[in-house]
Amino acid sequence: MKMSFRLRAAVLSVALLVAMLATWQVATMGSGTAADMDPEYAKLMGLTATQGKSAMPGPLDVGKILWKHLADPFYVKGPNDQGIGIQLAYSIGRVALGFFLAVIVAVPLGFLIGLSPLFRQALDPFIQVMRPVSPLAWMPLALYTIKDSGISSIFVIFICSVWPMLTNTAFAVANVRKEWLNVARTLEVSTLRRIFRVILPAAAPTILTGMRISISIAWLVIVAAEMLVGGTGIGYFVWNEWNNLSIANVINAILFIGVIGMALDQLLGWVTRLVTYPE
């Protein structure tokens, strides 16, 4: 009996993962002891780390540190020593708030641009100038005016999340099939009812695609923003562990960043499929 396509893909993925981990382990076997590789691991095992050596830890060493993070993700031992769960919670909270504010602004404005050629023509130069600006370029201005690193990070997330949603919403609304709009006008459907009963359902898949792009960009940007402003968050955690030469913790943080990013993308992808292909 032949294996299904999904099962074969899963088997291949596992095989590739095993091969990658085996290659990684072999490549790092001759690069020193675990204590040499990671001071945090040395502390955990009661060993003495060799100062000044920066050997790459292997997957077994990284796995032991990963288990430590998972066993107690919410510990607090001081302002600069908090569990990975707390760091991720701060980052996710900032992304969620900035993203939500972007939705409130981008979707209605996108509808206005999509429905009105006059507004589309008037606002297009501003959008074309502002959209290519790196979100991190706003950070110094945000810190200067807001004077709060956490709120400044949320503002940067807001800025980077607005543009994909705004452009996708405007495009989707402007390209709703004219036949549907003509039928609604023939039936004398009010403008507000036409927006919610005809335009919004037709444009929803493209709007959600813009949201999916925005959340991915926002999760990328929050790591860099937190590296700049410090304090709390997974970006700050990465930078702090690098300063401590704890490479295994940096690798673990990269893993957590990737998993959370995938989860956010899959969540919005599921919502998009639900709207596009309702049962």
Image: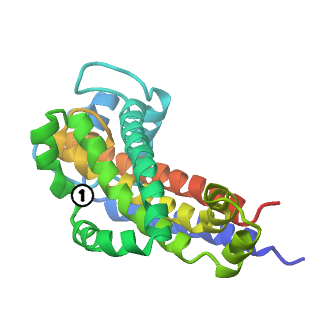
Which residue is pictured at 49% across the width and 62% down the height? 111
**Residue 37 located left or right of residue 99:** left
**Image vertical order of residue 27 relative to residue 8, above or below:** above
**Residue 74 located left or right of residue 229:** right
Residue annotated with mark 1: 135
**Image vertical order of residue 160 relative to residue 16, above or below:** above
Question: Can you tell which quarter of the image residue 163 is in?
Answer: bottom left
Figure quadrant of the C terminus: bottom right
**Residue 28 located left or right of residue 55:** right
**Residue 69 located left or right of residue 134:** right
Location of residue 34 in the rendering, given as x and y in whole percent from the top left corner = 30, 44
Instruction: Please state which amino acid type lies under the numbered disc 1.
Output: Pro
**Image vertical order of residue 217 relative to residue 232, above or below:** below
Mark 1, Cα crowd under 10 Å, few <14 / some 14-19 / many 20+, is many
Location of residue 26 in the rendering, given as x and y in whole percent from the top left corner = 39, 63
Q: Secondary structure at mark 1?
A: helix
Q: Nearer the viewer, residue 254 or 202?
A: 202
The colour scheme of the drawn protein is rainbow
Which residue is pictured at 33% across the width and 30% down the height? 44
Which residue is pictured at 27% across the width and 39% down the height? 237
From this viewpoint, is residue 34 visible? Answer: no
Location of residue 36 in the rendering, given as x and y in whole percent from the top left corner = 22, 45
Location of residue 27 in the rendering, given as x and y in whole percent from the top left corner = 34, 65
Which residue is pictured at 80% across the width and 73% down the height? 4
Q: Nearer the viewer, residue 30 or 161?
A: 161
Q: Residue furthest right?
A: 1
Figure quadrant of the N terminus: bottom right
Question: Can you tell which quarter of the image residue 178 is in?
Answer: bottom right
